């Protein structure tokens, strides 16, 4: 599975599932959105994760499962088992790693076995990661993984389109891999360790204009086992989660139940179609002073918004 195909599935509701295996990580990157380090012990119950992914069927499964963290390859056996269960049902799997293991000359066998179980491997690389793991070490490990037959890509992070590091690293990747390894580029946002210095999130759009949110498409298993409808870091971390973004828990729900809630919720249908700001405005709610994502979380518990969404987006008409 190549990066373009994975990204192309992102807007499709329930086409993917994000699994946060652990918040632990051996690296302490300055921009880490989850604030991960080796002392953190937040992670879903492994048996519950296996049961949840084991509930996939050939008829009812996500197209792709993304294993992330923290550092998911601190749990290579679990990562491999989850990938095996998902692929058995027909899902494809991908893993995003901070590349801590690249600092040794040889990829540890347990990690290499876990990587061999997935359909796509993505390596995080940016100016902050390079202070922890050398670029040459990451390149060497990616060559090894690619030569083993697994599709690879880079997950790059920078401070914006004019970031000189992004220009430099994309040129270096093209030169090193002959233009055959793609990259996904994201902007640092003020979450986790970046909260004190990164640029604030963009302000919300004009309430009269529709601004659909594709981030409400793929369910996310958070570090406490809660399944959320959105991967915004505040939504993943803060409790209680807003009711319209809470899809259940892996300890009590299976994939079929989570998928049904994600697909059939009138509020989520409207967020994916017109966005939270426009939904609030058409329901008579006052504009929220914070960001686009702040405004979405603020919709939780607003009965006028829920009623407005039901009037438009419930039942067969809403499904269409």
Image (tube, grey):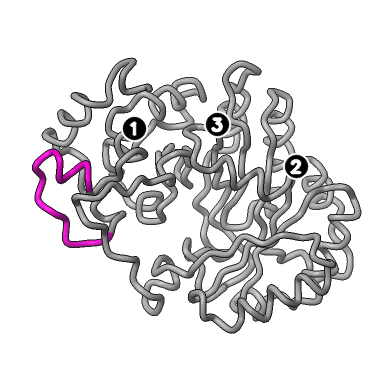
Q: Residues within 10 Å of mark 3 (few under 14, many from 20)?
A: some
* Mark 1 residue element: helix
Q: Which sits earlier in the primary sequence, circle 1 or circle 3?
A: 3
Q: Main secondary structure of the magenta part?
A: loop
Mark-to-mark CA distance, 1 and 2: 31 Å
| Image coords of residue 241 (percent x, y) | 30, 43
- Range of residues picked out in magenta: 278-291
Residue pictured at 85% horizontal, 60% vertical: 107
The answer to whether residue 287 is magenta is yes
Pointer 3: what residue?
48
Quadrant in the rendering for residue 130: bottom right
Q: Residues within 10 Å of mark 1 (few under 14, many from 20)?
A: many
Quadrant in the rendering for residue 27: bottom right
Pointer 2: what residue?
118
Asked if residue 169 is positioned above or below residue 102 in the image, the reply reads: below
Q: Which mark is residue 269?
A: 1
Give the mark toward the camera: 1 or 2: 1
Mark-to-mark CA distance, 1 and 3: 28 Å
Looking at this view, is 12 or 140 the one in front?
12
Q: Which mark is residue 54?
A: none
Q: Is residue 190 left or right of residue 312?
A: right
Give the mark toward the camera: 1 or 3: 1
* Mark 3 residue element: helix
Mark-to-mark CA distance, 2 and 3: 20 Å
Q: Which sits earlier in the primary sequence, circle 2 or circle 3?
A: 3
């Amino acid at each position: 599975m190549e990066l373009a195909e994975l990204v192309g599935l992102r807007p499709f509701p329930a086409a993917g599932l994000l699994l946060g295996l652990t918040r632990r990580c051996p690296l302490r990157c300055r921009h880490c959105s989850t604030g991960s380090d080796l002392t953190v012990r937040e992670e879903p119950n492994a048996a519950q994760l296996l049961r949840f992914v084991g509930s996939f069927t050939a008829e009812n499964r996500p197209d792709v499962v993304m294993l992330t963290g923290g550092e998911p390859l601190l749990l290579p056996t679990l990562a491999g088992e989850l990938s095996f269960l998902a692929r058995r049902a027909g899902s494809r799997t991908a893993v995003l790693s901070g590349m801590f293991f690249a600092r040794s000359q040889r990829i540890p066998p347990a990690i290499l076995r876990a990587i061999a179980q997935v359909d796509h491997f993505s390596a995080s690389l940016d100016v902050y990661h390079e202070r922890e793991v050398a670029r040459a070490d990451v390149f060497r490990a990616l060559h090894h993984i690619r030569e083993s037959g697994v599709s690879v890509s880079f997950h790059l992070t920078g401070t914006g389109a004019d970031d000189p590091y992004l220009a430099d690293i994309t040129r270096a990747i093209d030169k090193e891999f002959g233009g055959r390894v793609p990259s996904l580029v994201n902007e640092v946002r003020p979450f986790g360790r970046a909260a004190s210095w990164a640029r604030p999130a963009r302000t919300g759009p004009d309430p009269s204009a529709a601004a659909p949110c594709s981030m409400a498409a793929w369910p996310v298993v958070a570090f406490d086992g809660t399944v959320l409808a959105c991967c915004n870091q505040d939504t993943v971390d803060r409790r209680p989660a807003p009711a319209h973004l809470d899809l259940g828990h892996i300890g009590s729900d299976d994939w079929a139940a989570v998928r049904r809630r994600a697909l059939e919720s009138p509020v989520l249908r409207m967020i994916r179609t017109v966005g939270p700001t426009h939904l609030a405005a058409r329901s008579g709610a006052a504009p929220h002073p914070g960001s686009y994502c702040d405004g979405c979380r603020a919709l939780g518990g607003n009965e006028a918004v829920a009623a407005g969404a039901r009037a438009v987006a419930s039942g067969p008409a809403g499904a269409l």
